[in-house]
Image (cartoon, rainbow, N blue to C red):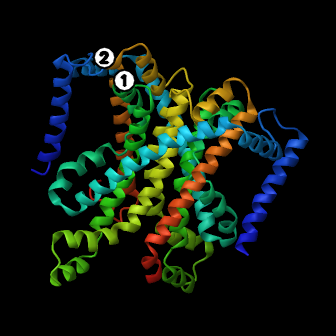
Amino acid sequence: MRLLRPLALIAVVLAAWEIASRSGLWNPLLFPPLAKIAYELGMFLVQPDRLMEAWVSLYRALGGFALAAVAGVLLGMLMGRSSLIADLLDPLFSGTYAVPKLALFPIFIFVFGIGSLSKVALIFLECLYPIVIVTYHGARDVNRALLWSAQNMGASRAAILRRVVIPATAPFIFAGYRVALPVAMIVVVITEMISSADGLGYVVIYSLSSLRTDRMLAVVIVISLLGLALDRALVFLRNRLVYWEKLDTYYV
Amino acid sequence: MNFFIKGGLLAALLVAWQLLWIGGLPSYVLSPLQIATDFFTALGSQELYVHAGTSLLRALPGFVVGSALGVALGLAAGVSRRIDQTFSPVIFLTYPVPKIVMLPLFMLWFGIGDLSKILIIALACFYPTFINAYYGAKATPRILVWSGLNMGAGGWRIVLGVVVPSALPLVFAGLRVALALSFIVMFATEMINSQSGLGHLIQVAESSLRFDLMYVSLVTIAILGYAGDRLLRAARHRVLRWQEAAQ
């Protein structure tokens, strides 16, 4: 019953699309019929070279994200547990937070070449910020009473880190990951649209310039589904690893 | 004290960069002094202002439209169950979708001019502001709402006097994310397809190997992003003074 209203909303949008495409008021290029988009979507899934493009985008996005996931948590933990490191690095991160790192892409192309490396480096940089900032706040605000009790019970520094700090920070780490993963998808698509000869972003631009809007829309759907699937997978992983705390979002 | 640490770190970084450059870096890395000179030279010419102005005229309307809609609908969904059940599932479902993929579609529908860019920026800004306003409104302490009702306030007065103020901190958090996003998306759209703006300038600079121009547009966008963030923080400080006082 609760699904009824959102499903109705989606049905209305799809119906409006089909009407717009059949009405003849607009060029069919602007609103390709749903059946053609579905056909292209099906073609996408059976053609190995298309799946290859999806794989290229995916490994760029996940590569950059994975590097940022490791480096970001390390940096955030260090900043959270050492006020000296926090004093040194926090101004750097909060000062450049609002600066679009995408502007560095042309320079990255010169440094890392026009292949995957410049894209992975940019994804790494964009993902690093949310992960570092959220992890830092989590690690800094670990409940002091817990730290004190652990110390009182004679736990070593390593044991405190492993048994108190990391579990207390884990929900924050995953919150940062959940912000960073869509960012990785955004950046991989943007960089492939700007300069690339492969990947999904390139296929979108290529289909548009060859006026195959049905194919373009099918690829847009594939990108959306990929973004969605990655988010679901992350939520699944989070609920397995951080089983003691429920995700406090309403729609998960 | 903190101020000196920050300043010292920045100065040390710049000096190290300059020394490295003297030691010999590839030609695409300019020295800080060189970049500063180029930047101030560019400040004297009209071109930079024109491009920066065009870029801002895309980013800001998109930000304003997208976040106004996002905040309004987010608050509405946080207050009204019917709106919540209709829109929230779809919005949360499409949240992890990279919105920039809609750009080619928008270019088809709204032309390759400014309108498609402004709309895609608005779309990108809508999501974080919606979600933050939604959680802000949802997290209003019940006890405040009950006291308001007890004291005889009606529906609208509860919303404006209790729900909105208690949602404001999260609303500002959403606005901050949206502002940063609006600059990223503006830059992306201009790099993908445009004849003007800072993103276009950096593309031209790259293809003609004008490294000076590349760094000038980089510095300009960095300054604009930083200034926007500062302005938003100042606004937040003014509006939320009562909250900071309470803590």
Residue B98 appears in the rendering: no
Percent position of residue B158, x then y: 22, 73
Chain letter, disc 1 residue: B
Label ID, residue B177: none
- The residue under label 1 is which amino acid type? Leu
Which x, y percent locates residue B151? 17, 84
Q: Are marks 2 and 1 on the same chain?
A: no
Label 1: state its secondary structure: helix
Neighbor class of circle 2 (other Cα within 10 Å; few <14, some 14-19, many 20+) is: some
Residue projecting furthest to the right: B23
Nearest the camera: A52 or B102?
A: B102
The answer to whether one can see residue A169 in this image is yes
Q: Which residue is mark 1?
A: B108
Residue projecting furthest to the bottom: A152
Kindly identify the residue that appears in the image at 64 percent across and 50 percent down.
B223
To which quarter of the image does residue A139 belong? Answer: bottom right
Q: Position of residue A153 (x, y in %)?
A: 54, 84
Q: Callout 1: few (<14), some (14-19), or many (20+) C-alpha neighbours within 10 Å?
A: some
Q: Which residue carries the number 2 mark? A: A29
Spatial CA distance of label 2 from label 1 is 8 Å
